[in-house]
Amino acid sequence: MSKLQEKIDLYTEAAKKLSISIETDLFKLVAKGLGPSIYKEDSELVSSSNQAELETVKKNFLIKKLGLEKDDAELDTIIQKVIDILGSGNKKKYRALFYYLLVKETGKESVYDVAVKAPEIETELIEKEKKAESAVKKSKKEKVMEEKVTDQAVEGVKAVATPAVEKTVDQTVEVVKEVATPAIEKTVDKTVEVVAEDKEVEVAEAEKVEVPF
């Protein structure tokens, strides 16, 4: 058993003797919030006859911790009510029990509700971060898959298209050859005929020329 639990059991037993009902979860938070003070004999108890100590309770706990903005008279009344509940003649007014009753009397349980919910909120934020990271990873994975599929599709198109294109080019060349070759041959034949005719004319002209001697 932890030292904190030992103290809580001690305070709970004292509350039962005074017929004070305790909300276990809230009481644990109040006691834990007091830190080392509950483990020291001189600070574990509240002296209701010490005005300076009651002023400290008012300023540090009611005003700073619980955030009360009431005037001194109202705060003093609340403190006196708690003293009466614990018994003015009771020399063992445990600080944890004293502060717990102040929380209940002022209705400021919400200050400790935040402490209770804080771990839940933190857990929720962690879960959201994990989901966000998972979504990012999934998105990246899907993108990689899409790129891979695209590359495969391109390769497939190339595999199908390249032979078809080559065949089309070959067919086009054959057609060009079929059309162009006769035309070229015809042009060459005409050129040869023209050259031959020109040669005959030159020969004829040469025969007509008279030799002067």
Image (cartoon, grey):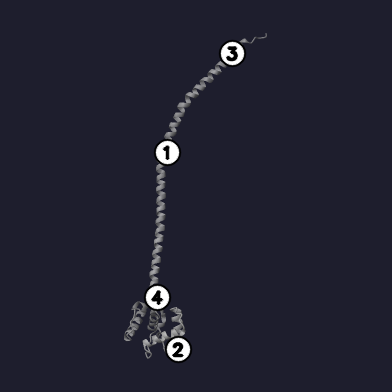
Give the CA distance from mark 1 to mark 4.
75 Å
Q: Which mark is residue 162?
A: 1
Query: Quick check: 31 above or below 182?
Result: below
Q: Which residue is label 2 attached to? A: 51
Amino acid beneath label 3:
Val
Q: Is residue 87 left or right of residue 205?
A: left
Q: Residue at x 46, y 87 (%)?
A: 52
CA–CA distance between discs 1 and 2? Answer: 99 Å
Q: Within 10 Å of the Cα at label 4, are there few (<14), some (14-19), or many (20+) other Cα atoms?
A: few
Residue 203's label in the rendered image is 3
Residue 192 drawn above or below residue 118: above
Q: CA distance from mark 3 to mark 4?
A: 130 Å
SS of the residue at dot 1?
helix
Residue 93 or 63: which is nearer the viewer? 63
Q: Which quadrant is home to the N terminus? A: bottom left
| Residue 31 picture quarter | bottom left
| Amino acid bearing label 1 | Thr
Mark 3 or mark 4, which is nearer to you? 4
Residue at 41% across / 43% down in the picture? 155
Labels 4, 2: front one? 4
Residue at the spot 42% in from the left edge and 46% down from the top edge: 151
Q: CA distance from mark 3 to mark 2?
A: 151 Å
As measured in the structure, the alpha-carbon distance from the residue carrying label 4 to the one carrying label 2 is 28 Å
Q: Residues within 10 Å of mark 1 (few under 14, many from 20)?
A: few
Residue 110 is marked as 4
Q: Nearer the viewer, mark 1 or mark 2?
A: 2
Label 4 near label 3: C-beta < 8 Å? no
Q: Quadrant location of residue 80?
A: bottom left
Point out the frontmost of discs 1 and 4. Answer: 4
